[in-house]
Image: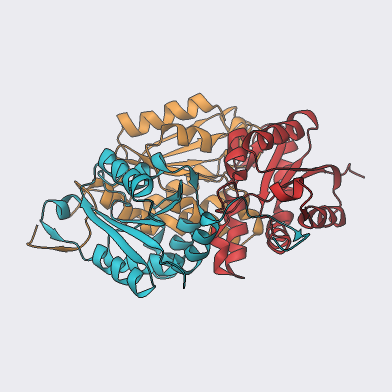
Chain colours: A orange, B red, C cyan
Amino acid sequence: MSEKLTAAVITISDKGSRGERIDTSGPRICSMLKEDGWDVVYTDMIPDEHDMIVNELVYVSDRLKVDLALTTGGTGFAPRDVTPEATMAVVERPTPGIPEAMRAASMKITNRGCLSRAAAGIRKGTLIVNLPGSEKAAKENLEAVLDPIHHGIDMLKSSGSADCGVPLADD
Amino acid sequence: MSEKLTAAVITISDKGSRGERIDTSGPRICSMLKEDGWDVVYTDMIPDEHDMIVNELVYVSDRLKVDLALTTGGTGFAPRDVTPEATMAVVERPTPGIPEAMRAASMKITNRGCLSRAAAGIRKGTLIVNLPGSEKAAKENLEAVLDPIHHGIDMLKSSGSADCGVPLADD
Amino acid sequence: MSEKLTAAVITISDKGSRGERIDTSGPRICSMLKEDGWDVVYTDMIPDEHDMIVNELVYVSDRLKVDLALTTGGTGFAPRDVTPEATMAVVERPTPGIPEAMRAASMKITNRGCLSRAAAGIRKGTLIVNLPGSEKAAKENLEAVLDPIHHGIDMLKSSGSADCGVPLADD
């Protein structure tokens, strides 16, 4: 039996981190991951501060070496929403198809789906994906990509490149 | 009754700015905005010059402080089409879902919809969105996103971040 | 009768370039282009090395001046998949709608379509487009955009900008 994949879930919310709001999105994401067989090894809540988000993403990628880091919050148009910028600052290889697929799924539910500025990408061995702050939208977005993410992380944990063509021998 | 949202409409066209072509896209976009309740406070026509586009976008964002700046023209593959590059040079926070939604809407009409290189993003309190140069495509693209843009600008004019979770008190 | 458009097809594969795998994607792409009326003037196979990919793309764009450069391979999540990063390093004007359209077409076949990190853009007179490494996905992706690419390259070979509005005289 293979080892479980590991995940970190980071809630990014000024009011949540000041105790002025109850975070329901982070716990909901954790439940979804656990039901899907993931080991959620780290959760945290931090304010909408660019440098704190950067530090947090570097910590879970480089130190904890989680397979998947999900953020919730800070992906909108409000002045302090900076999660995508902090994410792109730490990502080495963007994975634009993941936010595209999340927004395309959202657009089937509401035309406001195009307002998510969510980003995603790979840092070392960790896939980082931004989810919206609302519990409903976070759930819908995660459902849209959780299945293919398994395959993406399998590739990421492999050695070498995703080679094309026909192998000449069993290798 | 709330104040009207303000907009600038900038036509980017070498031939238009030399008087060799009649700009029908700019006026059409203005009509659509006015019918939708916007106050169009500024219009201009400039050639396809990177630095002139940059200056114009900085002017309407930082000086005029319009809520929405729409450009039309310069989003294609022609050698002098540089509107997206000039736009990304001034944008602080990209809003990739807006061009994605515009192109997805165009693709339902013509597979050439994928050729629009339009960009969009936020600079200070202004949302900047590139529209294609053809009147028909500009109209179709704007229709695809004008409704959610209202909500995006409401968020942008709010203070703080789009917080997730449940408020502990009416705030 | 107009001259044929020219293309280069570059297979990017560690194992292929070591002779450990037979490249079926490159030849398939060449066949599709020839059937579509293109003159495939250059093919090569190189390993998943950022600088070699950069050099190759600069060579076919700046020296060979091909109209279209297609790559296959290196667009996934595997640690050595760096084709999109090398592509974005040489591209002057991104064409994000092309990978969006390819991924949207893939997503109708498999939800793993969102895992392609393919990029595309213009360098001087050449359109560069990344295709996945698997022959099946490369074929599906190319089919999704080959028709509009003709029109994009027509624009790219034109002088000036794609002007909007109504011409005042035949020009």
* C7 lies left or right of A86: left
Q: Is residue C13 visible?
A: yes
Q: Is residue B170 visible?
A: no
Q: Residue pushed farthest left?
A: A169
Q: Residue pushed farthest right?
A: B1
Q: Nearer the viewer, residue A66 or B49?
A: B49
Q: Residue at x 26, y 51 (%)?
A: A155
Q: Residue at x 45, y 32 (%)?
A: A89
Q: Nearer the viewer, residue A107 or A59?
A: A107
Q: How far from the left and from the top, in percent, is residue A47?
A: 56, 29
Tell me how many marks there are: 0
Residue B22, above or below B11: below
Q: How far from the left and from the top, in percent, is residue C112?
A: 37, 61
Residue A82, above or below B166: above
On-image quarter of the C terminus of chain A? bottom left
Find residue A60 and report its image quarter. top left
Q: How far from the left and from the top, in percent, is residue A103?
A: 54, 55
Q: Nearer the viewer, residue A145 or B99?
A: B99
On-image quarter of the N terminus of chain A? bottom left
Q: Residue at x 43, y 66 (%)?
A: C3
Q: How far from the left and from the top, in percent, is residue B142?
A: 71, 57
Q: Residue at x 58, y 54 (%)?
A: B76
Find residue B140 and report its image quarter. bottom right
